[in-house]
Image: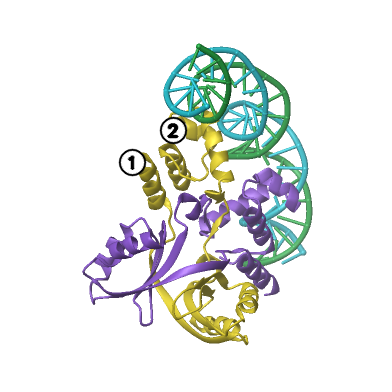
Chain colours: A yellow, B purple, C cyan, D green
Amino acid sequence: MAIDHLDGRILVLLAREPRIGVLEMSRRLGVARGTVQARLDRLQSNGVIQGFGPQVDPAALGYPVTAFATLQIRQGQGPDVRAHLAGVPEVLELHTTTGTGDMQCRLVARSNADLQRVIDRVVGFDGIVRASTAIVMENPVPLRIIPLVEQAAADSDGV
Amino acid sequence: MAIDHLDGRILVLLAREPRIGVLEMSRRLGVARGTVQARLDRLQSNGVIQGFGPQVDPAALGYPVTAFATLQIRQGQGPDVRAHLAGVPEVLELHTTTGTGDMQCRLVARSNADLQRVIDRVVGFDGIVRASTAIVMENPVPLRIIPLVEQAAADSDGV
DNA sequence: CGTACCGCTGAGCATATTGCCCAGCCGGAA
DNA sequence: TTCCGGCTGGGCAATATGCTCAGCGGTACG
C-alpha cells in the first residue's frame, strides 16, 4: 500500500511512456528485469495499478461538450437513480456526495444542443428532484496522477 | 473522428483486456493483424486513443478521500489560480465552468482531517474568493468510456 | 466503361521481448 | 547464528513485434 521510491519511478516512467516494456524499464531504472517485474506484479495485486486501459478522448469520439450535473435525489430513491444513470452512456462518472447536492455526475454531449437531450434523459426519472448543470469550458489540469505518485513516493522515503 | 464498428470493437476489447497484444486482438476479432495495427495507428493519430497510461488508484496510494471543490475566482486572476492549483499534487483535475462557480476541481486526501490541509492549501491563494467542497462518499459509476464507445460505434453504423 | 486508389488479407522475415527458470548475494529479523 | 525475503545476472524456449510484399475487392472519378 505504501510505495517506495522505486515504485514511484516505475509508475512515473510508465505514465510518461506507456508503451515501454519491462526490459526497457529495467534498463532505464538501472535495476534487474526481475525486480521491475516483481514490483509491477505487486503494484497490480495491491490495486495501485488498476489496469492499462486505453485513455479515450470523448471529444475525438464526437462528444466535445463536457458538463457536471449536481442532482438532488428523493429520499430512498438512491439505488434506482444509480441504476438509471448507469444506463445512460453519456454519464461518464457518478459520485454520491455530502452537501446540498446528493449526487454529482460528469456528462458529455455532441453539442450544447445535444446536452439538453442528455440532461433530459438524465433527469427524466422519478427519483430526481432537481438538477443543476455547469458546462465545462476549459480543462487546465486534465486528470493526472504523477504529482500524487511523486508525493506518495517522497512521503514514504521521508518516513 | 467518426469510428466504425470495428474501431468500436477494438476499443472495447482493449478496455476489457488491456494487456492483450495486436496479434491476439486480430485473432479474436477475426481480421488480419495488419488491419488491427492500422486501425490502432489511426485511432491514436486521431487522438481517440490518447494513451495507455496506468490507471492508478489514489486510495491504494494512501489517499482514500476524494472531494469536489467549487471555486470562485477574483476577476482576472484565472491564470494565476490555475498555476497555483497545478502545483498542488492533491489536485487531480481542474475545470473552468459556467455557472455560479468559476472552477471545479477534484481533490484527494489521506483522511478527512488531511482534507482540511489540502483545502487550506488550495484556497490559500489570493485570487480565490470562495470555495465550497463536497466530499465523495460512494462512486457508483467509476470513470468509464465503454458505453459511450459503443454508442458512437452504433451511431456511425446506423448513419 | 475503364482506371486509379484505398483498405483488407495472408504471408514471410529478422529482431526484440516475454515468461520462466536458476544460483548467488545481501541485509534485516528472529 | 540462522533464516528469509528481495535483488541480481544469467540463460532458455516461445511468442510478439515491426516491417515488407503481392493480391484482391470495392468505390470514386475521369
SS at badge 1: helix
List the single residue furthest toward the left.
B126
Q: What residue is shown at x 53% (from left), y 51% (from top)?
A: B52
Where residue C25 appears, as percent x and y from the top left, is 48, 15
Distance, label 1 to label 2, CA atoms, is 24 Å
Which one is nearer the viewer's eye here, A14 or C10? A14
Relative placement, left or right, of B48 versus A140 is right
**In front of the other: D4 or A118:** D4
**Residue at position x 41%, y 48% from top?**
A149
- Residue type beneath disc 2: Arg
Residue wearing tag 2:
A28
How far across and how far down the image is residue A41, in percent? Answer: 57, 39
| Dots 1, 2 in contact, CB < 8 A | no
Q: Residue at x 23, y 71 (%)?
A: B127
For the residues beneath circles 1 and 2, the answer to whether they share a chain is yes
Callout 1, which amino acid?
Gly
The reply, left or right, for residue B110 in relation to residue B137 is: left
Q: Is residue A103 above or below residue D1?
A: below
| Residue matched to label 1 | A158
B44 relative to B153, above or below: above
Residue B149 in view of the camera: yes
